[in-house]
Image: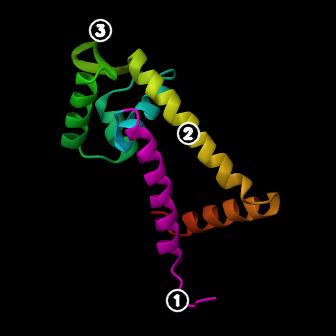
Amino acid sequence: MDKEVRIGKKMSMLSKRIHRRIDKEASQYGVTGVQARILGFIYHKSDKKDIFQKDIEEELDIRRSSVTSVLQLMEKNGHIKRISVLEDARLKKIVLTEKGMEIQRNVYEFILRIEKSLRDELNEDEFNILISLIDRLAKKIAD
């Protein structure tokens, strides 16, 4: 095995390939990968609390200006609605429309299929070792 193999490079390549596959699938529904991630975040978190633009900025680590323009486009395309909250009319919670929910469901089902195909590639021991190693390395370089 090549002694110059870089762990970070290999992990990054795998991550990029997964994201590219998901982005390609999302594009079939007229959304970008970032838009699909936003739809997924809203879908999975909005049953626990109201979601605001700031939540999306923090969760996805995206600049405010970028999130603003993406949300404006998503609203224009009928994927989300912004609804004023009673406590503060300046605050607008973000909710999915039926169209947004449908796209989210389709992309999420695709993600589950990718996850299953990757999982099926490994036996139980390999899977457990991989997860353990990833967790250990992530902890090693955590902030």
Q: Looking at the rendering, in which quadrant would you find the C terminus?
A: bottom left
Residue, disc 1: 4
- In the rendering, at what x and y percent does residue 19 appear? 45, 52
Q: Is residue 3 magenta?
A: yes
Q: Earlier in the sequence, mark 1 or mark 2?
A: 1
Q: Residue at x 61, y 40 (%)?
A: 112
Tag of residue 56 = none
Q: Label 1 to label 3, Cα distance in Å?
A: 58 Å
Q: In the image, which residues are magenta?
A: 1-29
Tag of residue 86 = 3
Provide the secondary structure element on which disc 1 rests: loop
Label 1 is placed on what type of residue?
Glu
Neighbours of disc 3 within 10 Å: few (<14), some (14-19), many (20+):
few
Tag of residue 110 = 2
Label 2 is placed on what type of residue?
Phe
- In the rendering, at what x and y percent does residue 37 appear? 42, 39
Q: Nearer the viewer, residue 58 or 112?
A: 112
Is 137 on the left or on the right of 74, as rendered? right
Main SS class of the magenta portion in the image:
helix
Q: Nearer the viewer, residue 81 or 89?
A: 81
Q: Label 1 to label 2, Cα distance in Å?
A: 34 Å
Residue 45 in sight from this viewpoint: no
- Mark 2–mark 3 CB contact (< 8 Å): no
- In the rendering, at what x and y percent does residue 101 appear? 45, 22
Label 3 is placed on what type of residue?
Leu
Q: Nearer the viewer, residue 48 or 14?
A: 14
